[in-house]
Image (cartoon, rainbow, N blue to C red):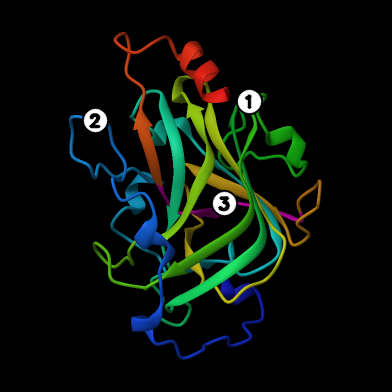
Amino acid sequence: MKPRSCLVTGLFAVITTATMAFAADVGERSGVGERGRSPDEPLVVPNYLADQDFYQAGHTFRDAARVQQVYNASEFSTGPILIRGFYWRPCADPTYAFPFQTILTNFQVNVSTTSAQADQLSATFADNSGPDEAVVFQGKLRISSRNKPGPGNTRQFDIFVRFKQPFLYDPAKGNLLVDIQNFQSSRACYISEYGGQDGGSRAYSLDPNATTAEVVDTGVDVLRVVFTRVRTPRNPPIEKVQLAVAK
């Protein structure tokens, strides 16, 4: 879902950023890490894209679609974690990145642990989802971006989706599958993605209610993961943590 393969319609409104209230401003300020360490311990997947961008642009928030993306467990050196949300960043290509704020009236994110591998996803969405699949966000979503510079040639991660229910993920049990259904188009900017051999891939359809993908390719959104580390053996066994999260 790169701009070069679709018609770009030119939604470039002039926005006065001083009057905008950005969703990330009230997001996960304490960030991504465990207690007793830095409050900002970032985890970017795929890892090597943390400080570089290849000017490929994704439509995750712009177009109505269903997109399943898998991230190999090798991208996570954290051990078991409770994932509390994801940040996206604008594409570094100035043609496709701009400040915005918008509301998506119907947006859904499902997350699961899967045996499906990067670059080997099935075109049948149900075949990729894992047995612990959970709806972590559903409903109205307010998002925004300042489109500010980040490390290297990237933009800052400031497009935030906070989970309504944290997801317990243990990389030792499989890869992470992120299944997004966006039921409307919007004026959001294009987000950073890459389509190489990078530990992730996707399957997507421009029908958000589709059960099969129109395209299976190597593209994947670049994500910053907001998490709380689950430490053992001082913490309860991971099964007990999972039961606590479910209550």
**Does 102 appear above or below 10?**
above
Helix, strand or loop at disc 2? loop
Q: Position of residue 123 (x, y in %)?
A: 75, 44
Q: CA distance from mark 3 to mark 2?
A: 35 Å
Q: Position of residue 244 (x, y in %)?
A: 50, 19
Q: Position of residue 143 (x, y in %)?
A: 50, 64
Q: Nearer the viewer, mark 1 or mark 3?
A: 1
Q: Which residue is mark 1?
A: 132
Answer with left or right where residue 206 lies relative to residue 18.
Answer: right
Q: Looking at the picture, which amino acid does disc 1 mark? A: Asp
Task: Classify the position of the N terminus by image quarter.
Answer: bottom right
For label 1, the crowd category at 10 Å Cα-Cα, with few meaning under 14, some 14 to 19 and many 20 or more, is few
How many numbered badges does the structure rendering display? 3
Q: CA distance from mark 1 to mark 3?
A: 24 Å
Q: Looking at the picture, which amino acid does disc 3 mark? A: Thr
Q: Which residue is mark 2?
A: 35
- Magenta region: 214-224
Q: Which residue is mark 3?
A: 218
Residue at image position (37%, 73%) is: 147
Q: CA distance from mark 2 to mark 1?
A: 26 Å
Answer with left or right where residue 76 lies relative to residue 116.
Answer: left
The disc, 2 or 1, on the residue closer to the chain's N-terminal end is: 2
**Does 184 appear above or below 213?**
below
